[in-house]
Amino acid sequence: MTEPPLPHESADDGRARLSYEDARDELIQIVQRLELGGLPLEEALRLWERGEELARVCQAWLDGARARLEAYRAPEQSAANDVSAPGSAEEHDHGR
């Protein structure tokens, strides 16, 4: 017999795409419930599993954000490295 989903879970076990903020907020609530203790083992395990899933969702959002920022910054850094003006930091470093 399988356990019914927790109220915050959808029929697909919460695999639907959550926003970063929604996943983070739900994860915070789960951590707080687990820290309070006193839960039956099975419920604690289900919460922990959901927390792991939410942590992966949050990490995926953060990884995606980092990739977007790096992609945005890469052309700027490349252009800055291509132009070496007199007195630039690069020229200054070679004089040491």
Image: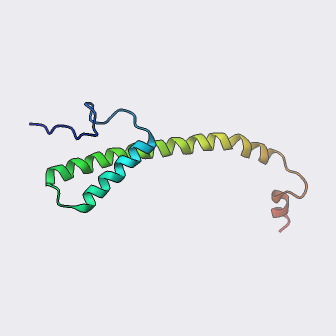
* Colour setting: rainbow
In the image, residue 27 above or below residue 93: above
In the image, residue 59 above or below residue 34: above
- Farthest left residue? 1
Tell me the quadrant of the picture where the C terminus can be found: bottom right
Q: Position of residue 39 (x, y in %)?
A: 17, 56
Q: Position of residue 6 (x, y in %)?
A: 22, 41
Q: Nearer the viewer, residue 95 or 68?
A: 68
Tell me the quadrant of the picture where the N terminus can be found: top left
Query: What residue appears at the point 40 percent right and 48 percent down from the top-left corner?
Result: 24
Viewer can see residue 55? no
Viewer can see residue 4? yes
Query: What residue appears at the point 51 percent right and 41 percent down from the top-left corner?
Result: 64
- Farthest bottom residue? 96
Side (left or right) of 68 relative to 28: right
Q: Nearer the viewer, residue 82 or 2?
A: 2
In the image, residue 11 above or below residue 56: above
Side (left or right) of 84 relative to 58: right
Query: What residue appears at the point 45 percent right and 43 percent down from the top-left corner?
Result: 20
Q: Position of residue 59 (x, y in %)?
A: 44, 46
Side (left or right) of 19 relative to 42: right
Q: Position of residue 17 (x, y in %)?
A: 39, 34
- Farthest top residue? 11
Query: What residue appears at the point 27 percent right and 61 percent down from the top-left corner?
Result: 35
- Farthest front residue? 7
Q: Quadrant of residue 88?
A: bottom right
Q: Nearer the viewer, residue 80 or 27?
A: 27
